[in-house]
Amino acid sequence: MKKNLFAAFSTLMLCSLLLVTTIGTVMAGNQDYSILEYWTQVAPTFDGEWTSPDEWTDGQHVQITDAGMFTYTADIMLTGSMNSQFLVEIFSDTTDDAEDYWQICVDPSDGGGSAPGTGYGRIDIIGHTDLVCYEGDGTGWTGIPVESDIEWADSLSDSPLNSTSHWILELQFNKESGAMTLGQPPNGLRIAVYDASNPDAGVQAWPPGSDVNDPDTWGVIPTYSMDPIPESIGFGVTALLSSIAVAVSFYFLRKRPKT
């Protein structure tokens, strides 16, 4: 009887904590589109293709409309720093066009806003050859020198997710310092691609319909997980996690390991 009462009391307290956590945490961006930050389990080789079948199975595979998908993980480096790592595949793009581009936008504190704020970062890769960096200034984007710690490669290749040769991008940068800082969640994130061979499709983005100049429309990284991603959502394009209250609870109830 006492055990049952204790269990009920514990459950009530946990629910109350989750409620307070949810109410007390104000997140910007489009909260209907969220992705958890998982730890990298298999270190990727940044060569623009899947070096091994399990290379990018340690993060959520998130659909970019019908055009393709992306994966995001965080990795602790031998130097003690942490890197943000991205895989982006454009299933529909099988041609090499100078006007093609990939785009990654980051909001380090999930501050949102109607214009890119100071410290917000943006990476464009144009024509599969040229990488350009931008930083928010409160009203728009300002071009800045390319961060020296950005490592990237793209190529036309097949993958475990699509057997037809298509464009694949692998990219990482230091998540704790520099213009592309993501820091500890919550963060804002937007991924976009453009296939010049299919101009009628326009810019394909996650979240769908999001605007590069409007962080309030970007997706959210609400928190991280200290556990490896469950196999049920770790491989293949998955539905987005929508329970923000549960996700945020991990952030408050668990401490990040020291680096």
Image (cartoon, helix red, strand yellow):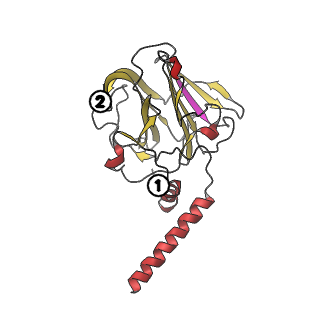
Element on which disc 2 rests: loop
Residue 27, numbered label: none
The foreground one among 242 and 183 is 242
Question: Where residue 196 sits: x, y (%)?
Answer: 50, 16
Disc 1, SS: loop
Name the residue furthest front.
Answer: 200
Front of the two marks 1 and 2: 2
Residue 200 drawn at (x, y percent) = 52, 19
Q: Quadrant of residue 68?
A: top left
The residue carrying mark 2 is 51
Residue positioned 63% across, 38% down in the render: 215
* Amino acid type, residue under disc 2 in the picture: Thr
> Which span of residues is magenta-colored?
119-124
Residue bearing the label numbered 1: 256
Going by the numbered disc 1, the residue's amino acid type is Arg
Quadrant in which residue 144 is drawn:
top right
In percent of the image, x 47 and y 50: which residue is there?
A: 224
Q: Residue at x 64, y 40 (%)?
A: 216
**Left or right of 36: which side holds 214?**
right
The reply to whether callout 1 and callout 2 are in contact (CB within 8 Å) is no
Answer whether residue 87 is visible to the viewer in this image: no
| Dominant SS in magenta | strand
